[in-house]
Image (cartoon, helix red, strand yellow):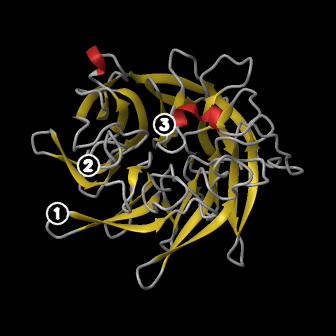
Amino acid sequence: MRQNKCWFRMGKTLAVLAMVLMLPTGAGAASKYNVLHRFTSKDGVVTNTSVFDAAGNLYGTTLKVVYKLAPNSHGSWTESVLYRFCSLKNCADGDAPTTLIFDAAGNLYGTTQLGGGFGDGTVFKLTPNSDGSWTESVLYSFTGGADGRQPLYGGVIFDATGNLYGTASGGGDLACNAPSGCGVVFKLTLNSHGSWTESVLYSFTGGADGQSPSDVGVIFDATGNLYGTASGGGDLACNAPSGCGVVFKLTPNSHGSWTESVLYSFTGGADGAYPASGLVFDSAGSLYGTTPSGGNLSDCINGCGVVFKLTPNSDGSWTESVLHSFANHPAANPYTGLVFDATGNLYGTTLYGGPVNGGVVFKMAAKSDGSWAYGLLHVFLGKPAKNPDGGLVLDKVGNLYGPTLGCGSGYKCQGVVFEITP
């Protein structure tokens, strides 16, 4: 389960008000919900549903394994474990895998939050074998020093030449205001003999530049700049002693260094606070994301969170607007990011809210006047799933898939993978 620097996500279920919220009439009635697989204690708590392959198989992670879900002709799905971590002494292969990505050859890449040569996490690769098994190799082990530590839920992305980029929540500048460092953005470069070299593109100081880059890594724009969020730092005069977080940009320089700039600093008020997930671009170059806190401060501890948009201006600045504030609705605390469908609708999840505080799947649809309409696709009632916390993915026909952290009372499982047909 995730840890949040500002909300202490290891104890999420204890940190939020016990709310009983009224559902709008007919909310979520038009969507179809289906559980694909329930995970047991043998596999650990399900954490991410990450990516499809070309054949329509779904891949993801729990705290112990990388799994595959294969669709059957009669509508069910079959789970298989590709790799079980901590299979080597002292978890040298990694521990607690996170978000996955494919390369063009069908290999899977990801990070582990812990384990490796120094116990501070790894970047790993899974290679498929002809007999159907997969071989794991560690591309890099974080030392916990200047190179970073514990890439919590932070996946990696490729550039056009095959280099990998990601974030680590700690390490970096060990003289900053966090005892374990304020985090880094890193790059892994493939060498001619097959090894990988890590370099730090930016080390956060914990000041106006941000602290603890958020869990879902960074994204590229069309010109090679990187964008991400950090859950701390920024406006140090906000209502949190270590700042309320930022949206940042990294611009590559001709000599190989990168320059960081802050696109927006959250104030902890109606604009949101402590961004904990990644960003997504629209076709016009605007950025969209969520914060689990801020918004209407009267309804949840530190606010119930917001969906926000950042619009670039001609002078290089960015303007933030709140598309939805989670207050007086059956939803609270969106810890995951957003996904667009082919027609420009946005989808996301909240970890909490609803009659049993089990969270929801929501949809945002753009209106002709520039505002966005908010609607519910599914409210989790704990039968047998609750608390979605791994982000959503879309298949080719627009169905949504995601994981939940838990199951309802009386259900002996460690979360599920679900499907929603909007």
Q: Kindly identify which residue carries mark 2.
A: 173
Asked if residue 263 lies left or right of residue 332, the reply is left
Mark 3 is on which residue type? Gln
Marks 3 and 2: which is nearer the front? Answer: 2
Residue 299: x, y in percent? 74, 51
Instruction: State the mark number for residue 3.
Output: 3
Give the residue drawn at x 43%, y 69%: 263
Mark 2 is on which residue type? Asp
Residue lying furthest right in this view?
25
Marks 2 and 1: which is nearer the front? Answer: 2
Q: Can residue 57 be seen?
A: no
Instruction: State the mark number for residue 256.
Output: 1
Q: CA distance from mark 3 to mark 1?
A: 33 Å
Q: How many marks?
A: 3
Asked if residue 190 lies left or right of residue 271, the reply is left
Instruction: State the mark number for residue 189.
Output: none
Up/down of 55 relative to 281, above or below: above
Give the residue drawn at x 69%, y 30%: 385
Up/down of 88 relative to 331, above or below: above
- Mark 2 and mark 1 lie on one chain; the one further toward the N terminus is 2
Disc 2 to disc 1: CB gap under 8 Å: no
